[in-house]
């Protein structure tokens, strides 16, 4: 069903289009969100009866230093129909992901990890996220890194976190 929707996307006219540009981190990125809500040509079986739209995100990234151009096209099915809301939610999702990665790197030193074999790095990443959430949940007025060090030095504090 989705394959036919994707191949039919060029035949259907988007109802709404939202575009945004992002300048930073040595690149220029343009994202265009197109939303099609006219789904009468697409087979909507019972499993897909609540679909309200097909979404296409076109991304173009220009690396300033090299001039290299990267293009990507992604498709989604959704119950949302507002192109601006969808476009902004996709970029804010990555903003949250990037901030989490930065915090994990600063507080838990994830980027300095030398664990590479098998599933070890993925398992430790999960453990780090659990620890990070426990530290973040604690109401004391210290930074995450300081809470982490203190939990290693003071057993009572560690028990308070757990």
Image (spheres, rainbow, N blue to C red):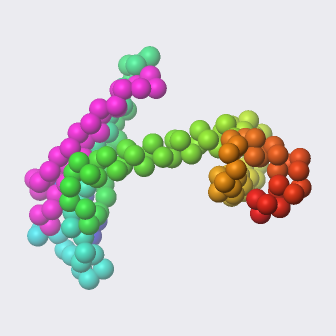
The number of callouts visible is 0
**Quarter residue 39 falls in:** bottom left
Compared across the picture, whether 137 is left or right of 53 comes to: right
Can residue 72 be seen from the camera position used here? yes
Residue 22 sits above or below residue 90 on the image: above
**Residue found at the far bottom of this picture:** 46
Give the image location of residue 24, x and y in percent: 41, 26
- Give whichever of 144, 48 is nearer the camera: 144
Residue 78 sits above or below residue 47 on the image: above
> At 28% from the left edge and 42% from the top edge, which residue is drawn?
58
Give the image location of residue 147, x and y in percent: 75, 46
Give the image location of residue 95, x and y in percent: 45, 42
**Quarter residue 45 falls in:** bottom left
Residue 54 sits above or below residue 115 on the image: below
Compared across the picture, whether 38 is left or right of 89 comes to: left
Q: Is residue 44 magenta?
A: no
How would you classify the magenta stretch by its main secondary structure? strand
> At 89% from the left edge and 55% from the top edge, which residue is drawn?
155
Can residue 5 be seen from the camera position used here? no
Q: Is residue 23 magenta?
A: yes
> At 34% from the left edge and 31% from the top edge, which residue is drawn?
22
Compared across the picture, whether 161 is left or right of 29 comes to: right
The magenta segment: 10-39
- Give whichever of 8, 33 is nearer the camera: 33
- Give whichever of 101, 159 is nearer the camera: 159
Query: Which quadrant of the rendered structure holds the C terminus?
Result: bottom right
> At 24% from the left edge and 78% from the top edge, which residue is drawn?
49
């Amino acid at each position: 069903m989705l394959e036919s929707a994707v191949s039919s996307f060029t035949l259907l006219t988007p109802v709404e289009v939202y575009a945004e540009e992002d300048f930073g981190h040595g690149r220029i990125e343009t994202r265009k969100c197109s939303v099609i809500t006219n789904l009468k040509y697409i087979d909507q079986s019972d499993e897909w009866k609540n679909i309200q739209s097909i979404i296409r995100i076109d991304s173009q990234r220009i690396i300033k230093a090299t001039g290299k151009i990267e293009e990507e096209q992604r498709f989604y099915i959704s119950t949302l129909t507002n192109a601006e809301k969808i476009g902004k939610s996709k970029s804010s999702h990555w903003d949250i992901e990037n901030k989490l990665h930065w915090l994990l790197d600063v507080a838990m030193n994830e980027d300095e990890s030398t664990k590479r074999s098998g599933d070890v790095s993925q398992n430790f990443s999960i453990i780090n996220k659990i620890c990070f959430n426990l530290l973040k949940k604690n109401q004391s007025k210290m930074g995450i890194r300081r809470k982490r060090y203190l939990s290693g030095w003071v057993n009572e504090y560690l028990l308070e976190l757990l």
